[in-house]
Image (tube, rainbow, N blue to C red):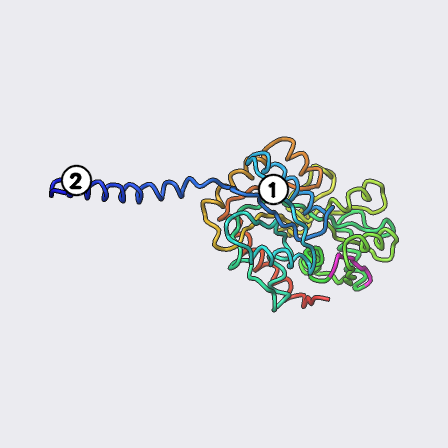
Amino acid sequence: MNLPTRRACMRAFIAGLLGTALCAPAAFAQTPYPSKPVRIVVPYPPGGTSDIIGRLVADRLAEAWGQSVIVENRAGAGGTIGVEAVARAAPDGHTLVLGVTGPLTIAPSLQPRLGYDPQRDLVAITLVAAVPSLIAVHPSVNAQTLPELIALAKAQPGKLTFASAGSGTSVHLAGELLKAMAGIDMVHVPYKGGAPALNDTIGGQVSMIIENMPQLLPHVRAGRIRALALTSTGRSQALPDVPAAAEALPGYEATTWFGLLAPAGTSAEIARRIHTEVARLVKLPDVRERLAGQGAEAIASSPESFAAHLRSETQRYAKVIRDAGVKTD
């Protein structure tokens, strides 16, 4: 082979290498997502608010992506088992968790041996929705409004009791926050779940309950318990005549929120793709209607906003836990 021919071959070879190098990033950037079934872990049993919201999101994402999106219920330890499983999963965007207030912002202050750090081991994608709780009393309690309840508690310190789904749950801390901000003394009665707490409130064994709106709403409408206030900053379309607690106690807020997170190391590009699709679907009228039926408000915040929310909520609940001396069962 003569010299000109060798030079021509060399130039062609180098050009081929450069072309491959230049095309590689473009090909990588265009890698389809999702490329296989996506799993959304719901860290609570089937049938609850988390499960309903998780399946609503999963069904709509599957329609949009043309790919299976499977809900996996991994309940236990107040939601921490499911969250830890996702924190340890491959960071490829195909395993997500519908995280909730408790295991993400309360557990770090209550469980020193928690197997994950929510802010280190997970990537915030988007807040999906928030659900207020109701402050409700047994009909025998002589209070028609939250200010009347506060006045009654001040007149009879330590006599009123409030039920919750368990020590250290978000609804328990909602009660502790109420006690602190109102300057009242009530006795906390923890149960192993919202159902037994509700049953004893209906039966009159305890004075009042704080629990997520979807669980209490049918019983409020049936007159078995009386709703005094919502734990959100504003009123709800589901109960427009029930005021927000903040109307009597400015600054009071204790909602339960639901957000999508992925394992740490998941790319910002994939997080953005998921956020964009969720933000689109929660604006759909039928989705908003389904969420409203659960007493939920659609949110779809940005990843940055959700991450900031996690930090501020963790700090807020840490103070409530410290000031009230809350311990787990």
Q: Quadrant of residue 105?
A: bottom right
Q: Quadrant of residue 162?
A: bottom right
**In front: 117, or 93?**
93
Q: Is residue 59 left or right of residue 29?
A: right
Which percent across, then down, holds residue 304? 48, 48
Residue plotted at (69% across, 67% down)? 327
Does residue 171 belong to the magenta stretch? no
Can residue 182 be seen from the camera position used here? no
Real-space CA distance between mark 2 and mark 1, rounded to the nearest whole angstrom:
52 Å
> Which residue is situated farthest in the top direction here?
285
Residue type at tag 1: Val
Can residue 203 be seen from the camera position used here? yes
Residue matched to label 1: 69
Q: State if disc 1 and disc 2 touch (CB < 8 Å).
A: no
Q: Start and end of the magenta stretch?
A: 159-166
- In the picture, the quarter occupied by the C terminus is bottom right
> Which residue is situated farthest in the front direction here?
1
Q: How many numbered dots are placed on residues in this image?
A: 2
The disc placed on residue 27 is: none
The residue tagged with tag 2: helix, strand or loop? Answer: helix
Residue type at tag 2: Ala
Q: Residues within 10 Å of mark 2 (few under 14, many from 20)?
A: few
Which percent across, then down, holds residue 320? 64, 62
Residue matched to label 2: 8
Q: Measured along the vertical axis of the image, is residue 259 above or below residue 66?
A: below
